[in-house]
Image (cartoon, rainbow, N blue to C red):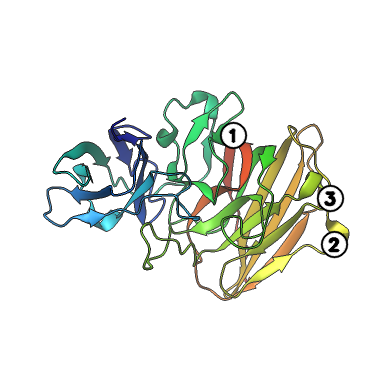
Amino acid sequence: MKPHLNIWYGLNQTFGHNGFTQHQINILGNIENYRHGLSAYFILNNNPEKKYLTIGSDTNRLAEKGDFNIEIGRINLVKGLNTIKVSLVGNSTDTLTETINVNFLAEGHLSLPYFINWSEVKNIQDAVDVADGKWQLTNDGIRPEYKYYDRMIAFGDSSWSDYEVTTSVIFHGFNKPEPGPPTYNVAHAAIATRWPGHDADNHQPFRKWFPLGATSEFQINENYENCRWRIFDGEYFYAEQSPKAYRKILPETKYYMKHRVESISEYQTLFSVKLWPTSDNEPTNWDFQAIKIGNSSNKGSCALIAHHTDVTFGNIEVLPVIKTKY
């Protein structure tokens, strides 16, 4: 069968209408019937420069055979219509080309509070920017179609600083954590705050997911026992729950998941997290809290991440945290 370019979220996509979520936009897809010897590149707005794409799987952001991620910095987009021509080239002279129309609105910053009710969403990208993975809308929320490395949706704005994110999560399954790629010895569902987007490195797409405020990961282990939180930023800040706080959770059960980020001094940021069954009242105390020293990455949007887990994230609520004087 002949190769075919499948653009997951359509040939007409809009960015910027929900604020400045991250440095770049991501156009995701897959080359169906991919075979060795094929290469792919894209051209932005008829610029003669060809940008070649990595074709998966790559044990990182590209999950399945034939996956690709067109990553374009927002500074390279013009306001209004942008055209992205993706070409697939084989050993013969035949070239398959698909054109994607990107409407970049650049409407300015998004204020808090912010809410997403998935039952009111018809197009996933009306509410979030998909950074990685093929996601589907369900009766309970949004769910990645394939368990792999950091399936991620981002939402919010680069101007956000102190805020609290609440969603729900259902764990349907996970890949067994093992040392090295692609699981890197962990499976989790996470909320990241003060997210700026992937940072530049030598990979396509970029793999460097820091600097950021922090990601709060709820880690899943065998038989859903000894599950726990860890909060870290990928650089110099790392904290995790002590073994006495490890817990067992139930699959196919809905839990609320909350992450708060707040500056408590000029050089200190407090991160607080909790997870509890939706059938219970919210606990007064946080499950885990940690303080990060330093004033880098003090603003940014949010991201929900499923790392080698099959999860459904529910409705999202982001509320401002009133900063106290310090």
Q: Residue at x 68, y 54 (%)?
A: 177
Marks 2/1: CA–CA distance:
31 Å
User: Disc 3 residue type?
Assistant: Arg
Disc 2 crowd rating (10 Å Cα; few below 14, some 14-19, many 20+) is: few
Locate residue 274 relative to residue 151 in the image: left or right. right
Q: Quadrant of residue 98?
A: top left
- 243 or 318: which is nearer to us? 243
Q: Where residue 9 sits: x, y (%)?
A: 37, 34
User: Disc 1 residue type?
Assistant: Asn
Marks 1/3: CA–CA distance:
24 Å
Locate residue 324 relative to residue 254 in the image: left or right. left
Q: Which mark is residue 274?
A: none
SS at circle 2: helix
- 34 or 199: which is nearer to us? 34
The answer to whether marks 2 and 1 mark residues whose Cβ atoms lie closer than 8 Å is no
Image quadrant in which the N terminus is located: top left
Q: Which mark is residue 247?
A: 3
Disc 3 crowd rating (10 Å Cα; few below 14, some 14-19, many 20+) is: few
Disc 2 target residue = 243
Locate residue 295 relative to residue 45 in the image: left or right. right
User: Disc 2 residue type?
Assistant: Pro
Disc 1 target residue = 315
The answer to whether marks 3 and 2 mark residues whose Cβ atoms lie closer than 8 Å is no
Labels 2 and 1: the sequence-earlier one: 2
Q: Residue at x 55, y 47 (%)?
A: 148
